[in-house]
Image (cartoon, grey):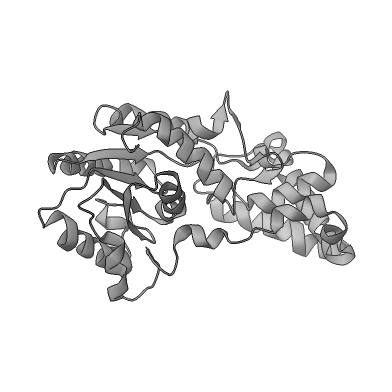
Amino acid sequence: MGWLMYLLVELPVLRFYKQKSQSLPKLTLGSAMPIFALVLSGFIVLWIAFVNGVWERNPEAGKYLKIENEASLFRLNECFFVTKEDNLDESYNKCLDISTDTKNVLVTGDSLSANITSTFIDTFPNVNFLQASAVNYKPGLESSWTKSAKTLDRLVRSKLWERDVKIDLVVIFAMWQSSDLPMLVENVIALKEKGTKVLVIGPPVDYYTNVPLLQGMSELIDYDLVPHVRRKGRSEMDLEFRSELESVATYYVSVVDAFCQQNQCIHKNDNSGLYTDKVHLTRLGTEVLISDIRKHLNGFLN
């Protein structure tokens, strides 16, 4: 048992801190103990679950791990470009088709933008939503682009910005870092000069590990583990983005405001999870965010 605990707990923790020692502040014994205790309890609960089938015997805990049909939110086989090849299927063009009968809204960015587009479509059925989403695609930040993101950007430029078409609103959402902010501001200004309104969704509320798994574990031990692994610094980054973008973008939506109050953040609602992994949202989670966005739009899309 001691050898097993070394393999499953001590060794991974030692490797983690060795890898992260350059980027993380020094941890005192006191500050490290809660982290170690959380990791230790997690491995113990997982071991028990594996051996004894705890999830099956505790459906209230196991339900958090049974996330169904959430992949459809991303329009994965339609409008979320994930291939590593540098070519786009012709069918992808329909994701950028303009309507002459209603407002046109372009939702763009990385997988976070893909995550919310389906709920946008369901919430505003009379609006034509275009989607330009790809892995690591942060519009205007070319240094972060993969080959597929560069290919997608060329298509967006050729089909939209190099033509005389009207985009009423551009929604930008991605896994932001503080270093993205200067170029994001420049991109927003450039988009507004084209005559479109711009809505920027700020940094996400995310976690260091899989939220549904922690929710199931929390149910088993009757103690909420999730708040202890929420990524630090997101509130400060949100304030930084808000300060720079509120005067530049037409709308700025804070994910922190949508999910958190007084540093307490929701990760489930009526015992239904809001996350599918560390950062992406379930259908219910996207509804929480889109509901907040709707308030900011003040009827613009109604």
Percent across and percent down for residue 259 are 54, 34
Q: Residue placed at 51% from the left, 62% from the top?
A: 72
Of 290 and 302, which appears nearest the observer? 302
Residue 134: x %, y % from top left = 36, 61
Q: How many marks?
A: 0
Q: Quadrant of the C terminus?
A: top left
- Left/right placement of residue 124 relative to residue 157 reads right
Q: Is residue 170 left or right of residue 8?
A: left
Q: Residue at x 53, y 49 (%)?
A: 279
Quarter assignment of residue 146: bottom left
Can residue 126 be seen in this snapshot? yes
Q: Nearer the viewer, residue 56 or 220?
A: 56
Q: In the image, is residue 34 above or below residue 120?
A: above
x and y percentages locating residue 30 in the rendered image = 72, 34
Q: Residue at x 25, y 27 (%)?
A: 247
Q: Is residue 40 visible?
A: no
Q: Quadrant of residue 79?
A: bottom left
Placement of the N terminus among the 4 image quadrants: bottom right
Q: Which residue is at a point 58% across and 27% down the rendered structure image?
A: 263
Seen in the picture, residue 153 relative to 17 is either above or below; the reply is below
Residue at the top extreme of this rendering: 262
- Image quarter for residue 51? bottom right
Question: Residue 31: x, y in percent?
Answer: 68, 35
Residue 147 or residue 11, whichever sits in front: 147
